Image (cartoon, rainbow, N blue to C red):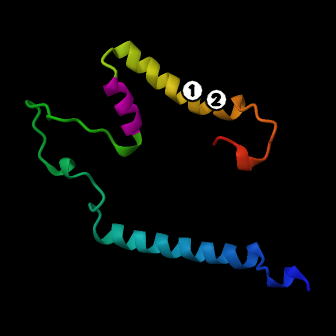
Amino acid sequence: TNSDTDKIPFHPYHSYKDTLMLSIFIFFMLIIISLTPNIFNDPDNFSKANPMVTPQHIKPEWYFLFAYGILRSIPNKLGGTLALILSVSILISMPFTHTSYIRSMTFRPL
């Protein structure tokens, strides 16, 4: 018995299926964003701005929340900046400092 007869090739089947699902997802997201453009906005952005009053809590966008959390957790300005630089440099240097003898991507840290 040949075990290759039960296998489904990746490219024609799974590639087309994934492309179709991604296209359907993008289509529905475009429909949702076209009909209700403010659905994903922060509710604080809809309040009228008052230049004389600072908001109680200033919250950054989602892609800056990790940096905001690091900077807020350390009260010293220089220490917070150094902690932020150190955290990003650790993430960047991890693939280069991995010293395992197994070089397969299965055992890589990132």
On whether residue 75 falls in the magenta region, the answer is no
| Left or right: residue 95 compared with residue 66 | right
Secondary structure of the residue carrying tag 2 is: helix
Residue 71: mark: none
Q: Is 27 located above or below residue 94 in the figure?
A: below
Q: Which mark is residue 93?
A: 2
Whole-percent x, y for residue 18 in the image: 61, 72
Quarter that holds the N terminus: bottom right
User: Residue 8's x, y, as percent?
Assistant: 76, 80
Q: Which residues are magenta?
A: 64-73
The quadrant holding residue 52 is top left
Give the residue at x 77% y 35%. Answer: 100
Q: What residue do we see at 38% from left, 73% from top?
A: 31
Mark 1 and mark 2 residues within 8 Å of each other at the beta carbon: yes
Disc 1 to disc 2, how far (Cα)? 6 Å
Q: Where does the image place residue 106, in percent across and percent down from the top left?
A: 72, 50
- Say which amino acid is labelled 2: Ser
Q: At numbered mark 1, what does the secondary structure look like: helix, strand or loop? A: helix
Q: Residue at x 11, y 46 (%)?
A: 48
Relative to 104, say whether 8 is above or below.
Answer: below
Q: Residue at x 13, y 41 (%)?
A: 49
Q: Label 2: few (<14), some or many (≥20) within 10 Å?
A: few
Q: Amino acid at mark 1?
A: Ser
* Mark seen at residue 89: 1
From this view, report whether residue 55 is shown above or below residue 47: above
- Can residue 72 be found in the magenta stretch? yes
